[in-house]
Amino acid sequence: MYRIIQRHKLISLHFMVVILGFTGILGKLISLQTIDLVWYRMMLAFICLFIFLLLKKKIHTIKKRNILPLLSAGAIVGLHWLFFFEAIKVSNVAIAVICLATSSLFSAFLEPMFFKRKILKYEVFFGAIVMLVLSYMLYEKPEHQENEINIWLGYTYGIISALLATLFTLINARFINKIDAVKITMLEMLGGVILISLLFIFQQDYSILSTKINVEDFSYLLLLATICTAGVFVWMIEIMRYITPYSVIMAVNLEPIYSIIIALMIFKTSEEMNLSFYIGSTIILFIVFLDGYIKNKQ
């Protein structure tokens, strides 16, 4: 698989983003509370990867000095998903996923700080355009939405989620050439489980221990944890060996487009947005392809 990714890195990247587009859909289909959903997602993903490494006899080759940083990155991943899925719960899939496009602006400023390189003017320019487009999309409230505060809350949670997504993508970039992608993902999933478990303890909420999950929810959780989490994360980390974090983030900006199309097919009117939303989505799509074109020319 790794050879295929190396040889066809751009195709692999965009195929990964298509799969990632189902994340928000599954999040809406699962009836669990947000915090329970994220805990089960990360726990199941951790178990799958742990068993895989155990069978490969590679579980003991993780260096101790790398464990804490990766657990911390996993905690950021956990927070990212908490805000992302909560954005879906209070608004809809379209709003939650389109906010992820703001990652490009965060990355344009944070990546040079992480890797001590100059800020590229066109990255800042593209990121600023994405933010302006997002503001334009906020201008008009969809007619079928009854509670306006949920729309704004959805955008707020979504943008916080995007910032956290940028942070953990940049942290991952520090380890991609040092540690196997499966090991990185396994430790990050464990880090998220630990963080959310501590949140349960802090809130003195132990209801997750007695939560009964129906067959439908468990099936969706299994898909979310294995293919859309463990598989996609390993895939993304491996791709980042050959592509910059900024380019990965810009490509992931296509996730909203795929998610919105799928959501409209499944959820119908609850996902319908105004004209400004779809115009903005088209502009973001154009920016992503333009960024890829410039990167290839370089």
Image: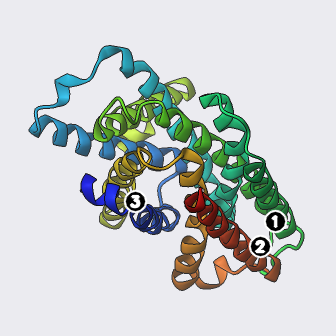
Mark 2–mark 3 Cα distance, whole angstroms, equals 27 Å
Nearer the camera: disc 1 or disc 3: 3
- Look at the numbered discs 1 and 2 and tell me whether their residues touch, using CB distance below 8 Å: yes
| Dot 1 or dot 3, earlier in sequence | 3
Looking at the rendered image, the quarter that the C terminus falls into is: bottom right
Mark 1–mark 2 Cα distance, whole angstroms, equals 5 Å
**Residue where numbered disc 3 is placed:** 9
Q: Nearer the viewer, residue 40 or 135?
A: 135
- Look at the numbered discs 2 and 3 and tell me whether their residues touch, using CB distance below 8 Å: no
Q: Residue at the spot x=11%, y=38% of the render?
A: 56
Q: Secondary structure at mark 2?
A: helix
Q: Secondary structure at mark 1?
A: helix
**Pointer 1 local density, CA inside 10 Å: few below 14, some 14–19, many at least 20:** many
**Pointer 2 local density, CA inside 10 Å: few below 14, some 14–19, many at least 20:** many
**Residue where numbered disc 1 is placed:** 133
**Pointer 3 local density, CA inside 10 Å: few below 14, some 14–19, many at least 20:** some
Q: Quick check: 267 above or below 256?
A: below
Q: Residue at the spot x=37%, y=34% of the render?
A: 177
**Residue where numbered disc 2 is placed:** 280
Which disc, if any, is residue 24? none
Q: Residue at the spot x=81%, y=60% of the render?
A: 129
Q: Residue at the spot x=77%, y=49% of the render?
A: 124
Residue type at the position of mark 3: Lys
| Dot 2 or dot 3, earlier in sequence | 3
Measuring from the top left, give residue 70's x and y in whole percent.
Answer: 42, 27
Measuring from the top left, give residue 296's x and y in whole percent.
Answer: 55, 61
Q: Nearer the viewer, residue 269 or 280?
A: 280
Residue type at the position of mark 2: Gly
- The picture quadrant where one finds residue 252 is bottom right
Residue type at the position of mark 1: Val
